[in-house]
Amino acid sequence: MADENVLLLIENGVASVRLNREERRNALDIDTATLMYEHMKNISNDNSVRVVVLEAAGSVFCSGGDVREMCDAADRPKYLRELSRLIHWSIIEMRTMKKPVVAVVNGYAGGAGLGLVMAADIAIAGTAAKFNTAFMNIGAPPGCGTYFLPRIVGYKRACELVFTAQTFNAEEALEMGFVNRVVPQEELEAAKTDLISKLSKGPTLAMGLAKELLHASLSNQFQTQLDLESKAISIAAGTKDFEEGVSAFTEKRKADFKGS
């Protein structure tokens, strides 16, 4: 059933969004992309959620758009327009929600799947992970990812990765900046749990403001960014977590943040 293509579990402030089309290599069709967007939008507005995990069932993270569905579409241009926009809406939610989003890459991430990895705030990968921009393999320009790709790897390398559609492994992805960390495949779940535990116990509102600042810095002018920083830290100064943080600092104890 379509409503099982993306599973959502919210527990102890952690929202897990799990791609669940293992039989189709977690490829994104219209139904799956719609459901992912709905989950991301709802999570963004859920104040109980302090951190988001994007992960996948099976041995593939996401192979990108569902090429079989593209092939069968009666109106391929219309289908690709709709599918790409749905994926873009999820990416917008991932980047604008004021809480950290972590991608856990258990296997192959290609095309739009790589785009999702790039859109996450933090990404960790198992040693079995492989990556590819992939779009050129079906004779298409990237349907997502061109905003992030040159910012991560630089313009010339971005051109090479897109034009050649070469596959690269987890260590190469780490070297180029696609992921923050690579761990042995059998340790991926433990690494995810450790990272999520740390983030979920942090000052969520401050993280959200910091995320907003970092994203804005990609396009802001210098003085505009400084002004935004000044406004953000003044907002944080009125939160309970800031009060707890400064109190814990002066009392030389570990802060107990509540995300408020």
Image (cartoon, rainbow, N blue to C red):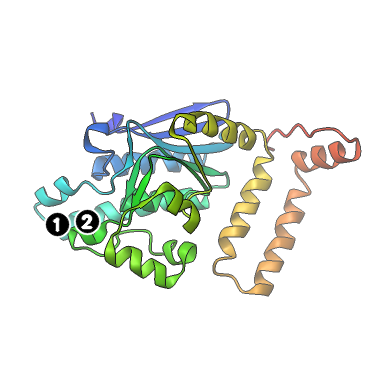
Query: Quick check: can you spot residue 47?
Result: no
Horizontal relation, residue 7 to residue 71: left or right: right
Q: Which residue is depicted at the point 42% across and 35% down?
A: 17
Q: Secondary structure at mark 1?
A: helix
Foreground residue, 64 or 155?
Answer: 155
Q: Are marks 1 and 2 in contact (CB under 8 Å)?
A: yes
| Label at residue 80 | 2
Q: Of helix, strand and loop, which one carries label 2? A: helix
Q: Which image quarter is the C terminus in?
A: top right
Q: Where residue 169 sits in the image (x, y, percent)?
A: 38, 49
Residue at the spot of label 1: 76
Residue at position x 76%, y 39% in the image: 240
| Amino acid, disc 1 | Arg
Kind of residue sitting beneath label 2 = Leu
x 38%, y 64%: residue: 146
Quarter of the rendering containing residue 9: top left
244 and 119: which is toward the camera: 119
Q: Residues within 10 Å of mark 1 (few under 14, many from 20)?
A: few
Asked if residue 72 lies left or right of residue 194, the reply is: left
Query: What distance separates the C-alpha of mark 1 from that of mark 2?
Result: 6 Å
Q: Is residue 125 left or right of residue 23?
A: right
In this picture, residue 143 sits left or right of residue 47: left
**Mark 2 nearby-residue class (10 Å; few <14, some 14–19, many ≥20):** some
223 w.r.t. 22: above or below = below
Quarter holding the N terminus is: top left
